[in-house]
Amino acid sequence: MIKNRAFFDRNATCGVRELTELANTSIPSSNHLLRRDVRFLGNILGEVLVHQGGRELLDHVEKIRETSKSLRADFDPKLYDEFLNAINHLAPDIRHQVIRAFATYFQLVNIAEQNHRIRRKRDYERSTGEAVQPGSIESAIQGLKDKNLPLEEVQELIQGISLELVMTAHPTEAMRRAVLDIHKRIADEMMELDNPSLTYREREKLCDQLRNEVLTLWQTDELRNRKPTVIDEVRNGMYFFNETLFDVLPDVYDELERCLGKYYPEQSWHVPTYLRFGSWIGGDRDGNPSVTADVTWRTLNIQRGLAIYKYETLLRQLMRKMSFSTSIVEVKPELMESIEQDRANVELKSVEPWTNEKEPYRIKLTYMIQKLQNVRSELFKGTKQSYNDASEFVADLLLIDRSLRHHFADFVADTYLKKLIRQAELFGFHLAALDVRQHSQEHENAMKEVLAKAGVVSDYAALSEEEKIELLGGLLEDSRPLLHENANLTDGTKEILNVYRTIFRAQQEFGRECIRTYLISMTQGASDMLEVMVFAKEAGLYRRTRDGSIVSTLQSVPLFETIDDLHAAPEIMKTLFELPIYRETLASMGDQHEIMLGYSDSNKDGGMVTANWELRVAMNKLTGIAKEYGVRLKFFHGRGGALGRGGMPLNRSILAQPPHTIGGGIKITEQGEVLTSRYSMQGIAYRSLEQATSALVKAAYMSRHPEEGHADSEADWERIMPGISETALTKYQDLIFRDPGFLTFFKESTPLSEVGELNIGSRPSKRKNSERFEDLRAIPWVFSWTQSRYLLPAWYAAGTAFDRYIGGDNAKLETLRGMYRDYSFFRSLIDNLQMALAKSDLIIARKYSDMIKDEEIRKRIFALIEEEFELTKKTILAITGQDDILDNVPVIQESIRLRNPYVDPLSYLQVQLLTELRAKRSAGEDDPELLREVLLTINGVAAGMRNTG
């Protein structure tokens, strides 16, 4: 914070006069407005603290803040001891409020920063006039024009791009929906304060509303009192479609078409569907027994319900605007004919008929609304009283569009109808494609039982991989079902089969686009893929027709997660591509194959450097093999939000891929707090998707026109990386897998077990009820290291890997410097490592290590971590030539520097509370209030660092 600007102003006032002056004054730097907003919200929180807890509470918070800030500026051991003493001797009732004060402050700062991002974009566009903003869609299309790319190639490029962003229910959003709703109201009101036309009284009223919202935030429980159900998670996901995506996504398309029309005006542009959202929420059953076939069916109904609601709302709005009268204009005859058909076929039951016969658009829209309402009724299925699929709805919209243009109401069609047509094309009646995911072992267990019951083979699991492939291939060729639908099977196997029947039923009800993909976790052989196809055949999702051709409406998608799985992936896919039955099936699906790569488990398994390298190697090899067989690959990148799980800005994650691997399109998971940070506000959602589109266009261009000049060097660099990766892998696994004390160190020096009590997701934190490291999910693994300020998965072993390669040889150091300068993969890797190091703090991490009971384990392993941290920092500075970490991005460097003094008190309080709670639990006692305080610190640290897992 800026000197003399207190965290909470002791004479806190709302500052209406200052806000009015700033809103009506030309500010030389927009950062003034960010500082103004942070101070303003902090002042309001100060008022709330005094109102709710008295001056004593504010004094405690201010003293802790000032001391923490002083320690960051100039570490003093004596002051450090005083600081810890002050924290450790807070009375429980005051301590609880202090934790909440710091956590709430971070929530308000995050709101201010998000609003400021939107403000900066608007300021840029306002101040630069016709200048093109870097990272915008226009900058990408302008770049194509500047490179003299001909129209024909631009058309091919736009036809070939594809990006699908997939929401997941991975539990990394620590905040409740109720809290996020308050955040949105605060954000909206803060944005309104920038309105220069507000009067003093209007501004004063806004300030009063903000006081009320911050007070409501203070009096709202941050913690969930139970784990969310899967349906809760589905509804949370729908929030983003309802609030932002339904409106923002078409706007991104519109901007792309505008820019294409500006730079290539000789073409009339209608961009094909290239950007869409999918979901795993309600379909991902890997390790989550709560996701049943019935839950998947309910999910699809909820999604359709929202889509229908949005369309009906928009049609009602359209009715108010479509007052065109046949007394004045001549509409197209086809519109009048369609109205007569509707009158003959559609009974207006729940919609009031429009009685003015001279306003045909309003009459038509009335019938359209009724037909939309009838979509969800079984009574009207297959009749003309309902839309049987979204294409019929789009056809009616296009009919209205043609008629409007017929009487020269083009502006109205472009303003009101064009966006709705795009929404219907994008979201259909299913809203978002739902992916289904299950673990390969579950399929094998079910196949074993089914084949035994069918008398095919007594122990399928005992067969060799070659025997399984031969058997499953034969079953796919055989049109007969294996079992009667009501065969006597165990509940687990029945549920596996019911999922496929539900998918078949869903495709009939909601359209084939509702579920197209079946993901197989821990794919370790070709048989894992063929098992899914055999089950699909049993449900009618796969069949050979009378003319001999294959119809398959569900694609098996492998998920390669661990380092060993990534190594095995190319051979597995080659085996499949060489199977005639599989190759024939793939041809029926357009010769395109989706493959998912897991960033979380590969990082947990092999560390940051090795995981990133092996993912790249796997992509290159898989692309090469697919090309041999005439197959286009769509890579699905399973990225998390945190650095240790592949997290990075969306546009960077697109540009980080080898350009030649994006030919079949890109899919990327959007998880947890990433959904909130990117898609809770329309302005930020638009900017994120705009940058993603810009990156997609640039990546498509690079895939067609590889950069010249570095080809030979890059080949040399790619010969260097395997050795660096191997060294990193050995160093990483020496600690994580081969040090007998490591698991003890991890469990006792991080809030691992307590994170599991946070109630942030319906899915268990372990795949099995075991204490094995292999069964721990990657999210709590990364979440726990982030909370304890180690961030170990995001940087450990990198220093050793680079240092050993250099080996004191300046020529090799210069090679790495050249790689950082000219090799995009290496530059991205180094910059991610910088971010992880900047967010780590081993002084605080040492306090967490004090909780370890075994002194030998504590001292030895912490010394290893500390040594590696310093080495990693030293080698990265040598490679980048910087004086300090993140000197290359001073804005982020400064943000972390300013946040740290406010995160630190929460971390120290967390250590104290964990120590007390674990002592009580070791003695057979429990303390719900103590646990609650621990969980509050977890939320607070997550908000302060803007990362969970």
Image (spheres, helix red, strand yellow):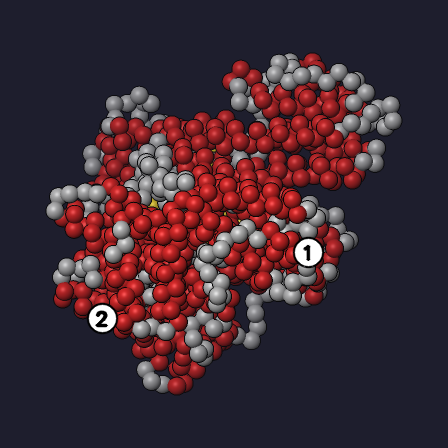
Report if residue 579 is visible in the image.
Answer: no
Front residue of this view, candidates 546 and 152? 152
Q: In the rendered structure, which disc, 2 or 1, sits on the residue that comes first in sequence?
A: 1
- Could you tell me which residue is drawn at 70 percent across and 16 percent down? 353
Q: Position of residue 186 (x, y in %)?
A: 53, 45
User: Mark number for residue 24?
Assistant: 1
Q: Give the distance between the C-alpha atoms of the residues marked 2 and 1, in whole angstroms.
A: 56 Å
Front residue of this view, candidates 284 and 171? 171
Q: Amino acid at mark 2?
A: Ala
Front residue of this view, candidates 270 and 277? 277
**Residue 453 position by quadrant:** top left
- Could you tell me which residue is drawn at 46 percent across and 40 percent down? 216
Q: Position of residue 744 (x, y in %)?
A: 18, 57
Instruction: Give yes or no for contact between labels 2 and 1 (Cβ–Cβ under 8 Å).
Output: no
Relative to 871, is 742 above or below? above
**10 Å neighbourhood of mark 1: few (<14), some, or many (≥20)?**
few
Q: Amino acid at mark 1?
A: Asn
- Mark 2 lies on a secondary structure that is helix
Relative to 876, is 741 above or below? above
Front residue of this view, candidates 40 and 594? 40
